[in-house]
Amino acid sequence: MKKTDQKCETPISSLIDIVFLLIMFFVATANFDSEGFDNNVELAKAKNLQKMTTKPINQIPISVDYNNLTKGYDIKVGGINATGKQVETLLRECVKRMGSSTEAFIRVDKRCKLGALEEVTTACGAAGVATLKISAEAEGGK
Amino acid sequence: MAKRTEYTSEVPISAMIDVTFLLLIYFIVMQKEVKEESYVAVNQPALNPGPPPPVLPTTCDIHVRPDAYHSRGQAYPTVDGLLPDLEHFAANSEVDPDDPMKRRKNVIVNLKLSVHATQQQLVDLLDTLAKYDLTKINFFYLKGAVDAPVP
């Protein structure tokens, strides 16, 4: 009996299409640490606070991340790590660049002690930041 | 005439598929939930405050300490204990119609914060104050001997 020469192939062309679509979706929706907003900060939840709709242009994000290894927290001003006097220096530079109506958007991890907030707000006061906003994770509500 | 040889040409896609799958796995693993944020604006004590307002505001002092919230000589382990006081303050003032944030007229909340209290305690209190539109808030920090427990 003559043996039939049959080729057996898995149809992968449609699979590749789907995989590429998935990659495009994940690239488009990837949540990088944009504009200095540190996504590792675990914010406390609040129901009744004003929701942040748009990110104003004259805003400096200051993230305070919990760290139980060093002094208890790490400060990032606009995505740049800063300690002690550097926080004030960076804020002064931001105020010089953005103008007198500069706002500080302070994002403190819920596990941090208020000593961290005190350090940031004191530096903001010394650097001449006009408005301070304390951030929380929005949970329904207003 | 010579016999024509049959060639089949194929694009080598196996390596590309490997890389594509690696990319896909990377993006799936790195995907994070986008969380909406909210905020409250606060004031710091000014070095050179201006003249006092014509009508002196009512002030409400709340101490935030690691163990409890303190108001009018009473200690409350949770913010719920402050609700009667806050209701009282809210009942005695109107919402300012000219204020874009609809805050209460002539009621200022002074928060005296212990540096040993946590951010969670502060946000819980700010959230409760926002519930009663008491969002004219001043921050003060307690340090050293002042930060000792309230007797």
Image (cartoon, coloured by chain):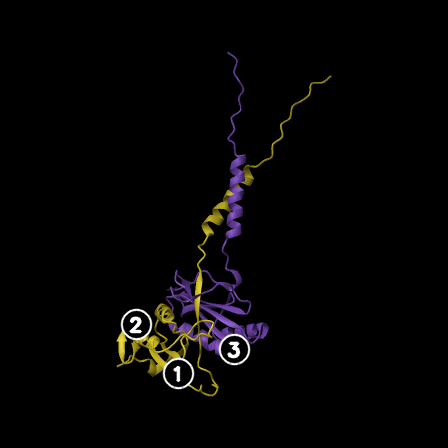
Name the residue: 30% across, 78% down.
B71
Where disc 3 sits, the SS reads helix
Q: Which label was assigned to residue B83?
A: 2
In the image, A92: left or right of B61?
Answer: right
Where disc 1 sits, the SS reads loop
Q: Which label was assigned to residue B129?
A: none
In this rendered view, identify the residue nearer to me: B132 or B146.
B132
- Looking at the rendered structure, whether the residues under marks 1 and 3 are on a common chain is answered as no
Quarter location, residue A112:
bottom left
The residue wearing badge 1 is B57
Q: How many angstroms separate mark 1 from mark 3 (CA)? A: 29 Å
Chain whose colour in the figure is purple: A
The percent position of residue A139, horizontal first and vertical second, equals: 39, 61
Residue found at the far right of this picture: B1
Discs 3/2, front: 2
Query: Which amino acid type is shown beneath numbered disc 2?
Result: Leu
Chain identity of mark 2: B
Q: How many angstroms separate mark 2 from mark 1 (CA)? A: 20 Å
Q: Is residue A3 above or below residue B55?
A: above
Query: How crowded is the residue under tag 1: few (<14 C-alpha within 10 Å), some, or many (20+)?
Result: few
Query: Which amino acid type is shown beneath numbered disc 1?
Result: Pro
In this rendered view, identify the residue nearer to me: A100 or B55.
B55
Q: Is residue A21 above or below residue A8?
A: below
Chain whose colour in the figure is yellow: B
The residue wearing badge 3 is A127
Q: How many angstroms separate mark 3 from mark 2 (CA)? A: 36 Å
Residue B67 seen in the figure? no
